[in-house]
Image (tube, rainbow, N blue to C red):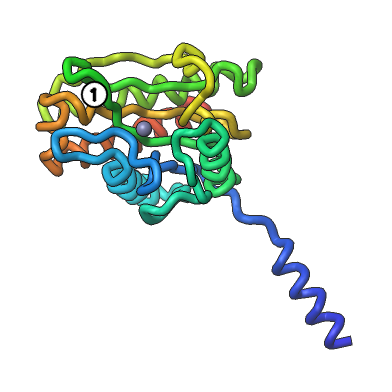
Amino acid sequence: MLAQLLAGLLLLQQTSPVSVVDVALDPGHSRADVGAAGNGLREYQLTLDLANRVRARLEAQNLKVRLTREDDQPLTPLLNPGADDDIQAEQEARIAAGGPARIFVSLHFNGGPSALRGTETYYNPERAPDAASTDAALATALQQDVVSALATEMGYQAVDRGVKSDLLAGKPYGHFFSLRGPEPSALVENLFLSNPSDATALHDDATLDALADGCAQGILDYFAAAGS
Ligand SMILES: [Zn+2]
């Protein structure tokens, strides 16, 4: 009888579901796929730094947060980080690692020709067609609050590149695979590491705090507008 009870308890422990968190935060990239780099800055390091700052702010507001990675390692072997299949596998592992959650927010920094600068936020209008406004609302809140925080806290006028459909980026999806999970989701490209002005701002630690304030506020504004 006791053995049966213990076996039952063990089974319960093994099958008990992972708790639902309010926010899955995905620090984009890893040491296997380092992402953008420029002006002494590396994307995969900045995204984890930023994610930890956002988590602290959200937890201070009594929200439950789960990061998709806590260190520099990828979640999958990612032997060929440029291959679509490997990218998809890694991004699907990120979705699984973050969930279950009420929303999924992926944090990135941008790279490109050095003249390009500013902040843009992506969402996937195909994720759930009848709920596309949910994802768009999350992306809009994040975009507005990040640009606003940079201006008010740092006096930095980031170029507001707006909210964008990730379908505009074309297929295959690359890191936009992370926007194909079950939860409302958005991906913030915070600033361009390849732009001298954005990079100079990012070398000031206070800019990362401003970005974290903006991301956290965007999430809070989204939940407030959603009535929860
Ligand atoms: Zn990225």
Position in image of residue 134 (x %, y %): 54, 22
Residue lying farthest to the top in this orientation: 168
Measured along the vertical axis of the image, is residue 36 above or below residue 32? above
Taking the image as drawn, is residue 199 in sight? Answer: yes
Q: Which residue is mark 1?
A: 148
Position in image of residue 16 (x %, y %): 70, 61
Lateral position of residue 190 relative to residue 41, left or right: right
What amino acid is labelled 1 in the image?
A: Ser
Q: Quadrant of the N terminus?
A: bottom right
Position in image of residue 211 (x %, y %): 25, 35
How packed mark 1 is, by other alpha carbons closer than 10 Å (few <14, some 14-19, many 20 or more), is many
Where is residue 210, by image quadrant? top left
Q: Nearer the viewer, residue 40 or 126?
A: 40
Position in image of residue 147 (x %, y %): 25, 23
Which residue is drawn at the image coordinates 23% and 26% (left, top)?
Answer: 192
Which residue is drawn at the image coordinates 21% and 41% (left, top)?
Answer: 209
Lateral position of residue 213 relative to residue 105, left or right: left
Quarter holding ligand 1: top left
